[in-house]
Amino acid sequence: MTSSSEGNKQELQKELEALKKQNEQLEKKAREANARAEAANHLKAMFLTNISHEIRTPMNGILGMYNVLRQTNLSSEQREFLDIINISGQNLLSIIDDIIDLSKIESGQIQLEAIEFNLKKEMERIIELLSIKARGKGIELISEVDPTTQINLIGDAGRLKQIITNLANNAIKYTKEGSVKIKVEPVEQTDQSSKLKFSIIDTGIGISEEGKQKLFKAFSQIDSSSTRKYGGTGLGLAIAKNLSKIMQGDIGVESELGKGSTFWFTAKFSMAPNAGLGSTAFHTDRSDGSDKLHILLVEDNLLNQKFATASLRKVGHKVDIAENGKAAVEKYQKNEYDLILMDIQMPVMDGIEATKKIRIIEKEKEVDKPIKIIAITAYVMERDRKMCLRAGMDEYLAKPFKPQELISLINKVYYGQE
Ligand code: ADP
C-alpha cells in the first residue's frame, strides 16, 4: 500500500468517526426533543382538563339560569335577548367541547359506547335540534331514512349524533337559501352488523377543488375570511373524520362551487336483538317516574344549586341541599334519601371522598340497597368518569346539562327507565 492511499484511509476513518459522532449527537437531540414533546403533550392534556372544568362550571350557571329565567313572565324583547345569551353560551360551549374532544382523540382516549338505540328516534331528536337554526335562516330541513335501514342498533348514539350535527350545522351555516337534507341508507347489512351511510346535502356556497384539499384537517378553514364571516374553529370536520374512522367508517365530500355540497360518512353498528326496519313505529317516552323522590343535592355553587333544584322540583321531587361533601355525609346519616346528586369539586370535602365515605358507612351498617349516587361534574374526560365510578358512583352527568337530561338520568338510575 502506498503512503498516499494509507493517508486517504486514515482521512476516511476520521471522517467516518466524525460522522458517527454527529449522528450520535443528532440522535440524542431527537430523543431530547421527543421527551420534550411528550412532556408538552402531557401538560397540554392537563391544561385542557383544567381549563375545561374552569369554563364549564360557570357556563352551567349561565345556561342553567337561562332555562329557569325563560320559564318566567317575560316580554318578547326580553325573551329575544335571553335567547341570544343562550345561543352565545351554547356556541362557546361547543368550542370548548371541540377542543377537549380533539385532545381526547389525539391522545387516543376516546372509547365508544355500545348501547342499544333507535336510529329513527335519534334522527328525530337531531332534526328537532337543528330545526331552530334552519327555520331561523328560512332553510328547509329534510330527513330521509331509507326504509330498508335497520333502526334498532347497538353503538354510540351520542358520537353518531355529534358527527351528524357537526356536518348539518355546517350545511346550515354555509347555505343561504334552499334546503339541507340528511339522508340515511344501508351500505352493508348482515345479521350481526350494519354499515350505514349518512349524507348531508346542502344547496349552499359549495367548495372549490382547491378548498377540498384543505378539509378534514385540524384548524383548517378554506380561507380566513370564512372565520370572520361564519365563525367556527375549523375543528368540526377533523373531529368528524376521526370519529367516523373509530366507527369503522369513512368520510368524504362532493361539492361544486356555488351549487352546494354533500358531506357523507359511513359508520358501522352492531344489530340489536330486536331489529326493526326504518318504517317500524317507535315507542313513546315513558312518564317521568311514578314516585317522587327525596333527593340530596350536593353542590357548592349557588347558581347551579338553584338551577338543579328548580329542575327537580318542577317534576315534583323533594330536594335538600348540602354545600360540600362533609355536609352531605352528615345529612345522609340524618335523613332518608332516595338518591344523591354529587358535584365533584367542592371546598372542605370533594364529591369523590364524600362518596367513598358514604359507601363505607353503608358497608358498616350492612344496608341492603346502597343509595344511588349520580356525579354531576364539569370534568368531561374519560378518566374523570372512571374516577367517579371507581369511587362508588352509579352514573355521571356532565355539566352543563338540560333539565330533561337530569330527569332522564335519574329515571334511568332509579327506576331503570331508558
Ligand atoms: P368550522 O366550520 O368551525 O370553520 P369545520 O372543520 O367544520 O370548521 O369546517 C372547515 C371548513 O370547511 C369551514 O371553515 C368551511 O370553509 C368549509 N365547510 C365545511 N362545511 C361546508 C359546507 N357545507 N359548505 C361549504 N363549506 C363548508
Image (spheres, grey):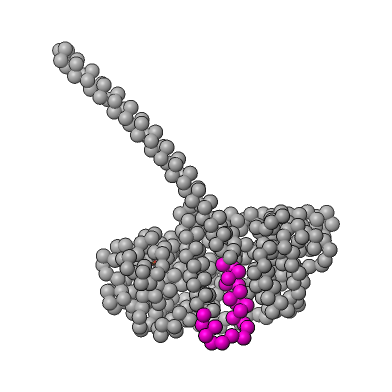
Residue 339 in the image: state x and y as whole percent: 74, 67
Q: Quadrant of the N terminus?
A: top left
Left or right of residue 259: residue 283: right
In this view of the protein, which residue sits in the foreground, 69 or 252? 69
Task: Say if 79 sits above or below 261 in the image.
Answer: below
Q: Quadrant of ligand 1?
A: bottom left
Q: Is residue 120 magenta?
A: no
Q: Quadrant of residue 286?
A: bottom right
Magenta span: chief secondary structure: helix
Identity of the residue drawn at 38% across and 82% down: 179
State whether residue 4 appears in this view: yes
Q: Quadrant of residue 65?
A: bottom right
Residue 187 in the image: state x and y as whole percent: 41, 71
What is the magenta range?
A: 59-81
Identity of the residue drawn at 73% across and 56% down: 354
Identity of the residue drawn at 36% across and 69% down: 228
Task: Say if 102 sits above or below 115 in the image.
Answer: above
Residue 316 in the image: state x and y as whole percent: 73, 79
Q: Quadrant of the C terminus?
A: bottom right
